[in-house]
Image (cartoon, rainbow, N blue to C red):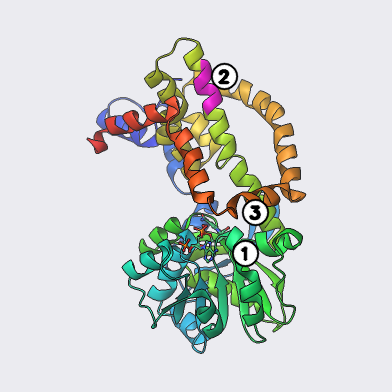
Amino acid sequence: MSYRATSAKLAARMICNSRVVASKRAMSLMARSRPTVRSTVVNAAIKPLIASRGIKQINFGGTVETVYERADWPREKLLEYFKNDTLALIGYGSQGYGQGLNLRDNGLNVILGVRKNGASWKAAIEDGWVPGENLFDVTEAVKKGTYVMNLLSDAAQSETWPTIAPLLTKGKTLYFSHGFSPVFKDLTKVEPPKDIDTILVAPKGSGRTVRSLFKEGRGINSSYAVWNDVSGKAHEKAQALAVAIGSGYIYETTFEKEVNSDLYGERGCLMGGIHGMFLAQYDVLRENGHSPSEAFNETVEEATQSLYPLIGKYGMDYMYDACSTTARRGALDWYPIFKKTLKPVFVDLYESVKNGSETKRSLEFNSQPDYRAKLESELDTIRNMEIWRVGKEVRKLRPENQ
Ligand SMILES: NC(=O)c1ccc[n+]([C@@H]2O[C@H](COP(=O)([O-])OP(=O)(O)OC[C@H]3O[C@@H](n4cnc5c(N)ncnc54)[C@H](OP(=O)(O)O)[C@@H]3O)[C@@H](O)[C@H]2O)c1
């Protein structure tokens, strides 16, 4: 597909050739690269501690929702709010790393609970956590914490629940970053005690991103939910913790909606669905005699390097508008066909999430002692597919990688 240019290219073209009157379309692209009212809201929300911002009613395409922003919880307020608390963060995988280091850098009293001598224990020490001071085994940390932030893998939450549950005494607050364990309690056996506050903050990104955005002075967007509100302060606690772990803005959901949308999204457009589409498109190009590099460029490289960033920055219509008239016409004709063909798959997928099949499968697979080795073998299959071997070579050719 030949796509024309990004707004940056258009800007450069217009500046270099000042005698050429800019086309109407280029002007419109330039104008639209300025933030709109809505993108101002979102961009401003991730700038640190702007006192004038705060709880907002925002019209999301016709539905008004409440969002909470970091400015509702400036650092001094967070320090005051959690001054008598010990935040015991259990598990040091992707989220434990991101949330734990952000809490520590925010000056809060955070300790880690990690099984001794595993990969996470070693990683925690490398990141400056000190055994006996702020690094303990899981049981000891749960005993010490007033907040127990359960960031073990979802399968491990189920496995360790019989040990952890009796330690969740009255007055503590239980925290998750995924609704998985309590929502599918018939399968996981994780049933939060009825006499303690139970809350959720789910960052919409990997723990690595939670950390990198925080370090840049930005913030991840997160959802929050309340399962049990015993103290009457569970909402406030969740909002405060969301900011403390590095969220820029937060919107409310329920545990059920969080888990259903999350499992559905990652199996769909975020990971499984997009991978399936890449493979199908690449196969057909190869079957029709296209070279590996051409097939990869027309399927993945142009998508991730040129077009998807435009969707992320300015929206789908902007991306269409930045492409050639030929590309636009074809995409406008074909997207309804893809939608119609794929929607039944998405309907099946949502049902499979909602009825617990996906949870059952995930628990069964990830509880096996050799789950890491099995996962590695499946990832190796992906790594060795022609398309992704080609990708490795294509990435090396990017000027910045030479
Ligand atoms: N990753 C994401 O992008 C993401 C995004 C949003 C929400 N979440 C949610 O955040 C939570 C944590 O996810 P994650 O991806 O950070 O976790 P993860 O990487 O899957 O978690 C691994 C942690 O669990 C520990 N663990 C595994 N089995 C254990 C066992 N039997 N006993 C004790 N510890 C055990 C590991 O310790 P060892 O190193 O010792 O094995 C490690 O510290 C989950 O609920 C997840 O759904 C994740």
Tell me which residue sits at (48%, 33%) in the image: 381
Q: Residue at x 61, y 61 (%)?
A: 178
Residue situated furthest top in the rendering: 289
Mark 3 crowdedness (10 Å alpha carbons): few <14, some 14-19, many ≥20:
some
Q: CA distance from mark 2 to mark 3?
A: 43 Å
- Say which of marks 2 and 3 sits in front: 3
* Residue at the extreme bottom: 84
In contact (CB < 8 Å): disc 2 and disc 3: no
| Depth check, front residue: 56 or 76 | 76
Whether 286 is drawn above or below 211: the answer is: above
Q: Which disc number belongs to residue 159? A: 1
Name the image quarter holding the C terminus: top left
Q: Quadrant of residue 255?
A: bottom right
The first of marks 2 and 3 along the sequence is: 2
User: Magenta region: which residues?
Assistant: 279-284
What secondary structure predominates along the stretch shown in magenta? helix
Q: Residue at x 56, y 29 (%)?
A: 277
- The mark closer to the camera, 1 or 2, is 1
Task: Residue 15 in the image: state x and y as whole percent.
Answer: 28, 34
Q: Residues within 10 Å of mark 1 (few under 14, many from 20)?
A: some
Q: Residues within 10 Å of mark 2 (few under 14, many from 20)?
A: few
* Disc 1 to disc 2: CB gap under 8 Å: no
Q: What is the number of the mark on residue 330?
A: 2
Indicate if the residue with disc 1 has its beta carbon within 8 Å of ligand 1: yes
**Label 2 amino acid?**
Gly
* Element on which disc 3 rests: helix
Residue at which label 3 appears: 363
* Amino acid tagged 1: Glu
Residue 3 visible within the image: no
Q: Amino acid at mark 3?
A: Leu
Q: Nearer the viewer, residue 290 or 330?
A: 290
